[in-house]
Amino acid sequence: MTVPLHLGLSFMTRKFACVICLKRHNVVRNKPFLCALRNFGTGPNDSDREDSSSNAPASTSPQFSRRASVFGRRRPLSPLERVSQLLPEDTLSPEVWALRDTRNTEVEQDSQSLGKEREEAIQEPQGSFAPHHVCVPGERPLCFGETLLAEFSRKRRLEFRKMFQLKEGLKLHSNWGLIAHNDMEGRPAGSVIRTSMGIPIVIRRSSLDEFTLFMKRGPAIAYPKDASAMLTMMDVTEGDCVLESGSGSGAMSLFLSRAVGYKGSILSVEIREDHHRCAVLNYQRWRSSWSLRQGEEWPDNVHFHHGDLISAGPLLAGRGFNSVALDMVNPHLALPAVVPHLHPGSVCAVYQANITQVIDLMEGLRCSALPLVCERIVEVQYRDWLVGPSLKKDGTFNKRKAPHEDDDDDESEPNEDTKGDLNCQDPVPFGDVPYIARPHPEQTGHTAFLVKLRKILK
């Protein structure tokens, strides 16, 4: 098998003579010529490998843009460029050369902003701070052990976001380059640090809702929009005693912990051991990060319990709760054990993933004699919007015009892509720039149904 394979590879690498006529596509002139077998690679080393003794002219194939070198990706070639790379350069028509020059110019203009950022990063020292920054009272710099968030946005689009823990000697890895953790330590929160590729990355502390979205999770979490609605339903205040069933990854436990404060307490029950362990780890990780950023301890008011709430009578004996939050598959089975310990007039908020679970819950309430009344069933929907100044094609601001003023200038048409640095433009008076407002193309879909049950003594 080795000999046929060797002969096949030798045949593929030999040069051959051929006559091609592409007059129909206006690629080459109609005459016979000799060409070599070339591959279709797009890398700088993918051209055919000539012998050192050959006197072939240097290749003038289109060079890759600085953008491709910054991101480590190769610019895709058009079919005409692929065909033209197979042909000798002296046979190409002037139209093909003009097309090559046009594409190279467009790609170069598109990569000017990132190329400029990379050149500035080479000249700028990596560990330098903003000279105009003045520390405000109570400000604390970043330190090892904190949970931080890295972000990069370009042209009103979020290109990169990652949550990580700051540790000595490690590096932040991304497709946009590397940043050493030691370069972040000691900087103010919200600093802009350039990666090894020259891309500016914003390094800041994560909020509680961002921590719950990006933390390590086992099951699905209660999203911040649903958690805030449940806190409003239950009317949780400082000093309350709340029962939670379904710890999950610990998201709802963290929101409840902040709401009740140092004087309150949370009892979180989870039937699965892996989910219980995940919730405890996330809770401890947030508490340790909070103590480093604020200089004070997060209230240790959540008591996690591994067990089944349906048979947790001894655990709830002698205890009363101001409100109850249930995130279970079959919450109607646990209500007989929970309702006796709920204060009269208080609320039990139930988190259900689909509407069939809500129907089963309503049927369970109908068949039971529990003193509960369903007040409302809601689905929380957020709608993000994009609001930005109207820009011309060259990246400058458009200006408001009189109602009956006629102007046929094509460049005044709104363009939503930011192609220039807005901070470098001449200042425009307040109210002279029109704005474009529209819903964000990426919207959060359905997450859960929230059922509000109130205990009424009949």
Image (cartoon, grey):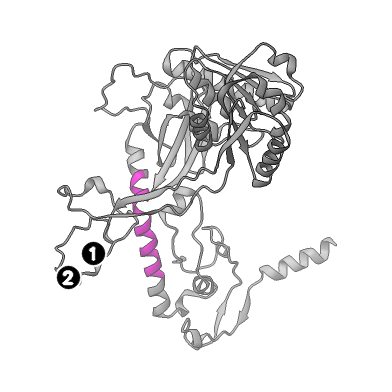
Front residue of 118/317: it is 317
Apparent side of residue 426 relative to residue 331 in the rendered image (left or right): left
Residue stretch in magenta = 100-117
Q: Mark 2 near mark 1, Cβ–Cβ under 8 Å? A: yes
Apparent side of residue 89 relative to residue 355 in the rendered image (left or right): left
Residue 105 image position (x, y, % from top left): 35, 64
The three-letter code of the residue at mark 1 reads Ser
Q: Residues within 10 Å of mark 2 (few under 14, many from 20)?
A: few
Q: Which residue shows up at 74% across the image and 25% down it?
A: 310
The three-letter code of the residue at mark 2 reads Asp
Q: Is residue 145 visible?
A: no
Front residue of 445/7: it is 445
Marker disc for residue 407: 2
Distance between mark 2 and mark 1 Cα atoms: 9 Å
47 shown above or below 121: below
Which label's residue is closer to the chain start, 2 or 1? 2
141 shown above or below 318: below
Front residue of 281/82: it is 281
Q: Which residue is mark 1?
A: 412
Residue 214 image position (x, y, % from top left): 54, 34
Is residue 90 located in the magenta-colored stretch of the structure?
A: no
